[in-house]
Amino acid sequence: MTSPRIGVLALQGDVREHLAALEAAGAHAVPVRRAGELAAVDGLVLPGGESTTIGKLLVAFDLLAQLRELVGSGLPVYGSCAGMVLLADRVADAHGPLVGGMDVTVRRNAFGRQVDSFEEDLLAPGLGIVDAPLRAVYIRAPWVEEAGDGVEVLARVRSGPAAGRIVAARQGALLVTAFHPEISDDARVHRAFVDLVRAHA
Ligand SMILES: NC(=O)CC[C@H](N)C(=O)O
């Protein structure tokens, strides 16, 4: 599979940016809104946006059960920000429907109500980000509060009051980041995900 077909869930959120980043990373990227489209992808991105809204829309578009089943059967999925919330098995505060699949507890808007956004340079060897740091942009971002034994921690916040918090993780074919690489014009996280999709094909 030279150019895997990777979908971006296109119900709400920053879909276009992910489609562009996936194409830059060597994938054939397609928006996904229907069951037939979801059934035809080798991997899926759950974009940033509003996790409660995306959860409700997954129910309204009749995609939630299918997506849970695909996650259960090993479909590679990358969740960024709101997408990370949706892939969590547990959310610290009340939440509507989740996709689940990753053995983590996530806290929404974890950087604090005053902190709408926060940026820093990040290295994440597990994501192939070794020499030049990635500009990590957090927008009303969640963090992983607790991770189960099977979860590989890929990055932690380096500075400020949130220092040490987990902001990137992987479990099997599921990848999550609290930040938004799709808006930093840096395709390395998407490239790591495309590699993950290839490895699971
Ligand atoms: N940029 C984002 O995706 C924000 C996520 C949003 N705060 C949520 O919990 O759904």
Image (cartoon, rainbow, N blue to C red):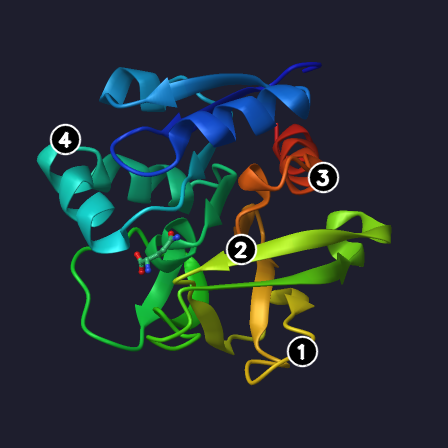
Three-letter residue code for mark 1: Ser
Residue of label 1: 159
Which label's residue is closer to the chain start, 2 or 3?
Answer: 2
The single residue placed furthest to the left in the displayed view is: 60
Q: How many marks?
A: 4
Residue visible at 39% across and 36% down?
14
Q: CA distance from mark 2 to mark 3?
A: 13 Å
- Location of the C terminus by quadrant is top right
Report whether residue 150 is seen.
Answer: no
| Disc 1 versus disc 2: nearer the observer | 1
Closer mark to the observer between disc 1 and disc 3 = 1
- Labels 4, 1: front one: 1
- Determine which quarter of the picture holds residue 158: bottom right
Which circle's residue, 1 or 2, is located before the other in the chain? 1
Residue type for callout 4: Phe
Q: Nearer the viewer, mark 2 or mark 4?
A: 2
**Nearer to me, 12 or 197:** 12
Question: How much space separates mark 4 and mark 1, taking CA atoms?
Answer: 40 Å
